[in-house]
Amino acid sequence: MFSRNSLKMIDTVARLGSFTAAAEVLHKVPSAISYSVRQMEQDLDVVLFKRLPRKVELTPAGEVFLTEARAMLRQMEEVKSQTRRAAHGWQKTLKLTLDNVVRLDQMKPLIEAFYATFEHAELQINMEVFNGSWEAISQGRADIVIGATAAIPVGGDFEVKEMGVLDWAFVMSPSHPCVREQVLTEEFVSQFPAICLDDTSNVLPKRHTVHYPQQRRLLLPNWYSAIECLKNGVGVGYMPRHIAQPLIEEGVLVEKILPEDKPLSYCCLVWRKDENHKMIEWMVDYLGSSEQLYNDWLRA
């Protein structure tokens, strides 16, 4: 019913408030713009613009039409982009999941490289905790997971690359009672809540940060909230070394050693097998070797 050019014309007239100004931008004569607008008004059987001595203004009906026209223009651009993506064999979106244990300082160069490489694609980044990462890729909510931890709890058509071992530090506030103890025992530590991230899985069994069996947990959604609770002496807990070390060096948190061996988490990169999804192949190549993955995402 309406061409792309006619919708752009209405948008231009509305933005500039003048047939003459719109004609200059659209490389037409003012009479052609005025005539085309009048034809559209006749087709719609409404008046879109009030003609004033030195300008034109949208009528209430014109305001409604302009909103819909802009929505149609955006949809037309999306159709064009999707068609181009299909012609070049690209999917629209790459879904990347980061496990909450990984470093985030490589996010900026990764995003910039992706958008420089894929003109018509988008990157969707999500964060999960522990088995939530495996659930995301098994349910198709992720194409790639960076930092999935522990043994593989699901079956599926995906590839795995080792990233190395994540180191943990047992930390607390400098004012916490545990700081004053020469030797921390299970009985003493169990008095205080264990700060744990809440596993984001809904179907798979939930896993949590290491804690004593009799120790009550405080389950939190991310390390930002965990750090605030630890700084305020609400509890104690294990934190990835790369997150904890700067806070320990600043004196914001204190590290203590428990008698038991500290946990070690074996992390990996996981991606869906899909020969037609060129962005997955590109991202896996970009992320590099196991050594590079460790240095970029896990190293303290």
Image: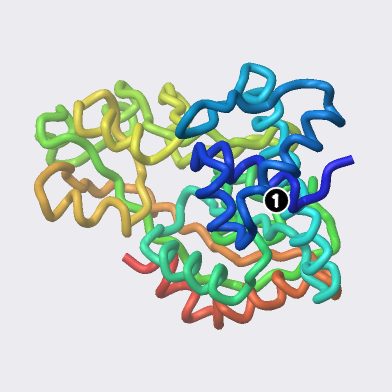
The answer to which of 249 and 189 lies nearer the viewer is: 249
Q: Residue at x 78, y 30 (%)?
A: 41
Can residue 277 be seen by looking at this rendering? Answer: yes
Q: Is residue 122 left or right of residue 300?
A: right
Which residue is situated farthest in the right direction here?
Answer: 1
Rendering coords of residue 269 (x, y %): 61, 66
Describe the colour scheme in one phrase: rainbow
* Residue 135 seen in the figure: no
159 or 122, nearer to the observer: 122
Q: Give x and y (percent) for residue 96.
A: 62, 57
Residue in the picture at 58% in, 45% down: 12
Rendered view: 295 above or below 69: below
Residue 113 vertical position relative to residue 78 in the rendered view, above or below = below
Q: Residue 165: give x, y in percent of width and height.
A: 47, 66
Q: Where is residue 97 in the image (x, y as percent from the top left)?
A: 60, 53
Query: Which quadrant of the view contains residue 58?
Result: top right
Q: How many labels does the image show?
A: 1
Residue identified by numbered label 1: 32
Q: Is mark 1 on a helix, strand or loop?
A: helix
From the viewer's perspective, is 6 left or right of 208?
Answer: right
In the picture, residue 229 is in which quadrant? top left
In this rendering, would 32 be left or right of 192?
right
Q: Is residue 231 above or below residue 144?
A: above
User: Which residue occupies the foreground of this view, 148 or 262?
Assistant: 148
Residue flagged by tag 1: what amino acid is it?
Ala
Which residue is at the front of the view, 49 or 175? Answer: 49
Describe residue 210's horizontal placement relative to residue 185 as left or right.
right
User: Looking at the rendering, in which quadrant would you find the C terminus?
Assistant: bottom left
Q: Residues within 10 Å of mark 1 (few under 14, many from 20)?
A: few
The residue that appears at 30% across and 45% down in the rendered structure is: 170
Query: Which quarter of the rendering shows the N terminus?
Result: top right
Residue shown at the point (83%, 22%) measured from the top left: 45
